[in-house]
Image: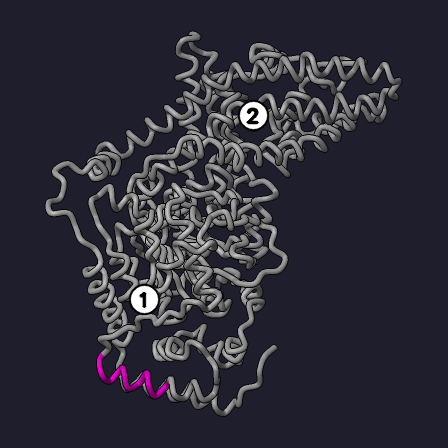
Amino acid sequence: MSKNGSTTKTSAPCETCPAHNVGNLKKLGINMDDWDYVVALAGNPNTGKSTIFNALTGLHQHTGNWPGKTVTRAEGGFEYGGSRYKIVDLPGTYSLLSTSLDEEVARDFILFGQPDVTVIVTDATRLERNLNLVLQVLEITNRAVVALNLIDEARRHNLTVDERRLARDLGVPVVPTAARSHEGIPELLQAIHEVATGKVVGKPHRIQNEPPALKKAIQQLVAEIEQAFPGLPNARWVALRLLDGDRRIIEAVKRGELGDLSIGSTERVNSIDMPLEVA
Amino acid sequence: MTTPTDPEKIESILSTAEKLRWDIGSNFHDHLMEAIYTDAARIADRAVSYPEKPPRFDLDRTIDRLVTSRVWGFPLMLLLLMIVFWLTISGANYPSQFLAWLLLDNGHPLLKTLAADINLPWWLSGLLIDGIYLATAWVISVMLPPMAIFFPLFTLLEDFGYLPRVAFNLDNVFKKVGAHGKQALSMSMGFGCNAAGVVATRIIDSPRERLIAIITNNFSLCNGRWPTQILIATIFIGGLVSAQWAGLISAMAVVGIAVLGVFFSFAVSWGLSRTILKGEVSTFSLELPPYRPPRIWQTIYTSVIDRTLIVLWRAVVFAAPAGAVIWLISNITIGDAVLAQYFIDWLNPLGLLVGLNGIILLAYVVAIPANEIVIPTILMLTTLVLGSGGAGRGVLFETQSLGDTAALLQAGNWTLLTAVNLMLFSLVHNPCSTTIYTIYKETGSLKWTTISALLPVVMGFVLTFFVAQVWHLLV
């Protein structure tokens, strides 16, 4: 366990600090009237988000070994290190760039719900494909923690993942976990706590390798967006989506919803409801 | 809430974006995805080290090759289903008998004596004990044991990772009938609960294919209907053969009905995608997750808590008022007969025409809120018709074993045809009110909700009518 504790550059000394203790975790179930921080659980389908959710909240969300099990948001709460957390289990997605209903729930929450911490749950045995989503989330927010889940399965397949290297490359804390057996949950809580309280500030990896023409276009648009919406934390991502012609984002810009983002409102997302429309 | 932002600035952002979109060309999305993939590959490559030599024998892959094989995939699927039902049917008998002995044979007389001791008025003790208590006790003794065996078994399969393989096997068929391959997953969810299955269709992006999945979800036999199938199959189908084969034959009958449901799913999807829901089939990629050894105790615990008790609770909640209604309609007399008799007589011609009877149809009307109470309602109403006045009226026979239930139903003029058609009608009839409400919430459309509710009922009547006519010709 001790090796797993070294999750980021800063958290190593926390091994000895009293906060590093599951005893501090108070599972609140669905009892969460007021909270200090909102945590979103995102990740590819079938990586164990609901298992982590259950481990943190003490709830028994039904878990199952098949992709697409969670199609709505599930919410729960826990208390850790003196702060109350609301945690939202999002449907699994491969990408934030497509438009199916379950993926939209996840994308809208990360963008419009403005969680204080987004935990990206990844499958350690299929890291490369999982990183596609991680990189997209890191485009939106720097307040992220990567849970390198199913590390027990990776071990079974003789894979070793250098989580320190990964943390350095991604610029956010990386915690190896095996949620089924509660391995790494204390370290994950600690990392969530540090990011939420601002003790750790991520410098997330931003997508490189764009063609030069693209880079210039993004810069120009970002400048304009930042001027219109000062304080918007993810202008670059909004620019990317505008360039891609994402109608949902264009609508959001038109209706001034982006303005709300810079204030940081978590209520809004609850009103996002998308009935099925058929001609 | 909304901060006023200069509309001119917004306009300008959008027009800049528009202009830049032309400049960078149409393959922007591909470029971006490519950049993401390149970065992901580079970072993953630096962090992960692979074993020197891949293991000679990969268990996961070997299992996958077997369960998704063209030749063995379907037979294995059926075999697994059979095993699950056989375990359920043969395992549920004894606990069912024990619960019936406890709640019906001993609990009921005890309560009656108690009520007499405290001088409860006859109508109150009738309503509470003969109506509400008996209906509830029936639901518990009939439903709890099979559910407590079936759900953990099903959840174990799910936890192990078998469901996506089922989807993989069925994908091809769904594509052929013009539906989305992911419908196999929402269909599998429907085997637990249709309302949950309808919500699960959200994984399907195309509205057209999602509607097909919603409308056909009802053909997945749900929790509330498994007990009906299991009980009727055990009594009537299992009763056709000698005791040692009864369990196996009844399991085969139930699997047959479930497979027929899947067939109807395909057939109706095919029909819809060629008539009112025409369109292209979308493709998708389905990930076959690694097999994970199921955590047996935890699975049993959560499936008992999550599924068994919730479903049972729902059944009890609906059974209690239904028990009261049944008691009332069988004790309120108009003219020289009780109310229920009028309903039954009125429904009987239609019922007999489709090889059922008036009692079954009335039970299905009473059971619209929950399929779970169909069998208890049928039994109580049958007792009512047979019971000639006095204390027997609207009071359940003290049936402690399947043999007595069989005797009761046979006394009510049930034949093998009645049993077969009840099993068919239980598979093909309107969804329960919870599911209908869920469909309305998901589609937001009255039209599609009505179609989803009425289509199966009509199909059910046509099917049972057809079977009854053929039966009468042959037998």
* Quarter of the rendering occupied by the N terminus of chain B: bottom right
Choose between B437 and B173: the one closer to the eye.
B437
In what element is the residue under mark 2?
Answer: helix
On screen, residue A153 above or below B251: below
Taking depth in this image into account, of B467 and A103 the one nearest to the observer is: A103
Asked whether the viewer can see residue B462, the reply is no
Q: Residue at x 53, y 44 (%)?
A: B195
Mark number displayed over residue B403: none
The image shows residue A171 at horizontal and vertical percentages of: 32, 68
Q: Main secondary structure of the magenta part?
A: helix
**Side (left or right) of A212 relative to B241:** left
Question: What amino acid does circle 1 point to?
Answer: Leu
Q: Which residue has dot 2 on it?
A: B144
* Neighbours of disc 1 within 10 Å: few (<14), some (14-19), many (20+): many
Measuring 44% from the left and 54% from the top, which residue is drawn there?
Answer: A189
Q: Quadrant of residue A182?
A: top left
Frontmost residue, B202 versus A139? A139
**Nearer to us: label 1 or label 2:** 1
- Is residue A267 inside the magenta stretch? no
Amino acid residing under circle 2: Leu
What residue is shown with label 1? Answer: A135
Horizontal side of A198 relative to B349 (left or right) equals left
> Residue A213 in magenta?
yes
Q: State which region is magenta.
A: A211-221
- Residue B178 in picture, x, y percent from top left: 35, 51
Q: Position of residue B297 (x, y in %)?
A: 43, 30
Where disc 1 sits, the SS reads: helix
